[in-house]
Image (cartoon, rainbow, N blue to C red):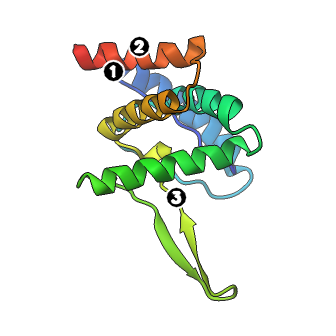
Amino acid sequence: MSKELTFRAADIGEFQTAKAWLERVGGKGLEAGAIEIVLRRPGREISQNAKFHAMISDIHHQAFRGYSFDGVKAVLVNQFATEMEEAGTPLANPGERVWDWRSKEPVYVRPTTTKFRKAEAGAFIEFLYAAGTDLDIQWSEPALAVYEEYREAQAA
């Protein structure tokens, strides 16, 4: 199993379903070798990454088509992490600079959006909206829906 699988349970019924799911996929995974099972409380919705991607996609297509989506995302996440650090609220799981002993230069490993906490994810949405506005991005329906959903959640 090279892919990480996640099952979210919020009540006992979903937990029972998760147990049956784990038996099925875990048993199949064991056919190929050892597996690892992790139990944790969810930090935020995994679907938030898809929401970030809608906004990043608009920025990529309208302002930086010459670069890959992943490259544009890396730059935006780096800018966000720098902004958070300068504001005195660094990310809980920041990036790091690692020394490459062969090329004799530092390599930057950017923070990953999947490890953003709820507040960081919300701040990243605000950051993306502001960055896109600065770049005169015309937001698509999916990206606008992401921002509106975020604003409604903030108001509640």
Would you name the residue on which mark 2 appears?
148
Classify residue 56 by image quadrant.
top right
Residue farthest right in this picture: 66
Mark 3 to mark 1: distance in Å?
A: 35 Å
Find residue 77 and report its horizontal and vertical position in percent.
50, 48
Would you name the residue on which mark 1 appears?
11
Q: In the image shown, does 127 or 136 lie closer to the viewer? A: 136
Q: Sort mark 2 into few (<14), some (14-19) or many (20+) by Cα contacts within 10 Å.
A: few
Residue 66 visible? The answer is: yes
Mark 2 to mark 3: distance in Å?
A: 27 Å
Please determine whether, in this image, residue 139 is positioned above or below residue 42.
Answer: above
Find residue 42 and report its horizontal and vertical position in percent.
36, 36
Mark 2 to mark 1: distance in Å?
A: 29 Å
**Residue located 50% across and 15% down the image:** 144
> Seen in the image, is 122 located left or right of residue 156?
right
Would you name the residue on which mark 3 appears?
110
For marks 3 and 1 on the same chain, the one whose residue lies earlier in the sequence: 1
Residue 42 visible? The answer is: no
SS assignment at label 2: helix
**Residue located 74% across and 53% down the image:** 32
Image quadrant occupied by the C terminus: top left
